[in-house]
Amino acid sequence: MKKFVVDEARRALAELYGHEAELTRREQALEAGVRREQEIASADPTGFAAMSYGRFAESVVRDRARFADARRKLEAMIAEQQDAVAEAFNEFKTVEILQRNRDARAAAERARKEQIVLDEVAAVNHARRHAGAAA
């Protein structure tokens, strides 16, 4: 059961990393668009592209702010999920270690009981041999 919790926490973290990669891709696309628009505006001899670039630049500023806000929130979520993964893994390992210790104690107890039985058999055999030799 604990392994399932670890797997689910890891899956959720991987999903957040996927969102982060998508956000990075979108930021890169925005910056590529800015470079394209700058080239178009600077290459336009009429100046019309330069006039419309102002409105474009305003939307880019808004988009950058949205991306920065989204990245801050996403980074906080990732940090929180990393903590959840670490906690789930620690709980899983604790349970695993406890079970291993229980199993080792049970095996030692079985071995102790088997040894008691073997010692009793040996004592009976020894007593029989000495009783038979004395008679």
Image (spheres, grey):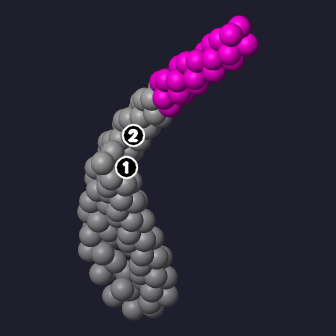
Foreground: 84 or 31?
A: 84
* Residue positioned most to the right: 133
Q: Residue at x 49, y 87 (%)?
A: 43
Disc ID at residue 126: none
- Span shown in magenta: 107-135
Q: Residues within 10 Å of mark 1 (few under 14, many from 20)?
A: some
Is residue 60 in the magenta section? Answer: no
Quadrant hosting residue 122: top right
Q: Which residue is mark 1?
A: 3
Q: Amino acid at mark 1?
A: Lys
Foreground: 1 or 131?
A: 131
Q: Secondary structure at mark 1?
A: helix
Q: Residue at x 46, y 82 (%)?
A: 36
Instruction: Residue 87 in the image: state x and y as whole percent.
Output: 36, 37
Would you say the magenta stretch is mainly helix, strand or loop? helix
Query: Is residue 32 shown left or right of residue 6?
Result: right
* Residue positioned most to the top: 134
Instruction: Residue 121 in the image: state x and y as whole percent.
Output: 58, 23
Against 21, residue 3 (above or below) is above
Against 38, residue 105 (above or below) is above
Q: Which residue is mark 2?
A: 92
Against 130, residue 56 (above or below) is below
Quadrant location of the C terminus in the rendered image:
top right
- Which one is earlier in the sequence, the residue at label 2 or at label 1? 1
Q: Residue at x 52, y 24 (%)?
A: 117
Q: Is disc 2 in contact with disc 1, using a CB cutoff of under 8 Å?
A: yes
Instruction: Residue 4 in the image: state x and y as whole percent.
Output: 33, 53
Q: CA distance from mark 2 to mark 1?
A: 6 Å
Q: Secondary structure at mark 2?
A: helix
Instruction: Residue 29 in the image: state x and y as whole percent.
Output: 42, 75
Q: Amino acid at mark 2?
A: Phe
